[in-house]
Amino acid sequence: MGRYTGPKHRVSRRFAENLGGYKKTPLAAKPYKPGQHGPDGKRKKTSTYGEGLIEKQKLKAYYQLRDRSFRRLFEEALRMPGNTGDNLMQMLERRLDNVVYRLGFAPTPRAARQLVAHGHIRIKSTGSEKARKVDRASYLVELGDLITVKDKSKEHLQIKESVAAKPQVVSYLRADHDKLEGELIQIPNRADIPMVVNERAVVEFLGR
């Protein structure tokens, strides 16, 4: 199944979370899931299997991943030392499209993905003399990687508007909005990742 391209607010309502980074969501007006005429108080308790499925779908929707890509990241997290759930979240956060969004260069994760795909982003790795174009959203940013906006793209209206809004940057990134550059300064701790999800349920679901 391909990546979801339908209404993003519908997905946010489904999981009762603002998964698109949008300033306005219909959650307050319609806090129940799409397809219902309103909560009737008779819903059955979600099973352990169901909870794991829902949390997995939530992560896939937020990070805009297909099932195969998500499974590949999970298997890599499983091979790494340490907590599998933490490893998975760290790799998801280090995806280039997500880093561009967290740095405040784009207003939403979807917009950040487009900036990367359209070649507006450059990366200068530690030890490299010059930055190179990276147009793969799945690229995992390494410690010390310098993420910059291409010179010709610095007047991009969407980038300028996003930076002008003075977005808050997470603690594991350093951002210079004047130079339109940023850097991963530490591997993110789970407590610092602003994503409300039960990754343990996801690990148990995928590990069945």
Image (tube, grey):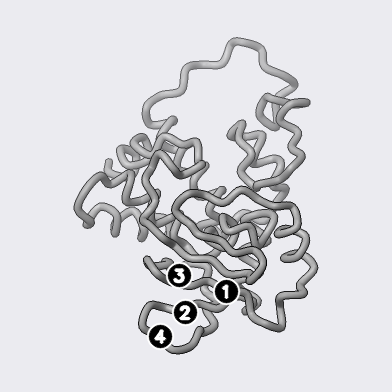
Residue 80: percent from the left, percent from the top?
23, 56
When the figure is inspected, residue 190 is found, relative to residue 90, above or below; the finding is: above
Q: Residue furthest bottom?
A: 129
Pointer 2 local density, CA inside 10 Å: few below 14, some 14–19, many at least 20:
some
Residue 42: percent from the left, percent from the top?
59, 11
Residue denoted by label 4: 128
Residue 77: percent from the left, percent from the top?
29, 54
Disc 2 to disc 1, C-alpha distance: 8 Å
Residue denoted by label 3: 139
- Look at the numbered discs 3 and 1 and tell me whether their residues touch, using CB distance below 8 Å: no
Residue 58: percent from the left, percent from the top?
52, 42
Disc 4 to disc 3, C-alpha distance: 17 Å
Q: Earlier in the sequence, mark 4 or mark 3?
A: 4
Residue 66 vs residue 74: left or right?
A: right
Pointer 3 local density, CA inside 10 Å: few below 14, some 14–19, many at least 20:
some
Q: Earlier in the sequence, mark 1 or mark 4?
A: 4
Looking at the image, which residue is at 70% across and 52% down?
166
Q: What is the secondary structure assignment of the residue under circle 4?
A: loop
> Any mark on residue 124, and which?
2
* Residue 52 image-quadrant placement: top left
Residue denoted by label 1: 148
- Look at the numbered discs 4 and 2 and tell me whether their residues touch, using CB distance below 8 Å: yes
- The amino acid pointed to by label 2 is Lys
- Look at the numbered discs 2 and 1 and tell me whether their residues touch, using CB distance below 8 Å: yes
- The amino acid pointed to by label 3 is Tyr
Looking at the image, which residue is at 32% across and 44% down?
85
Q: Earlier in the sequence, mark 2 or mark 1?
A: 2
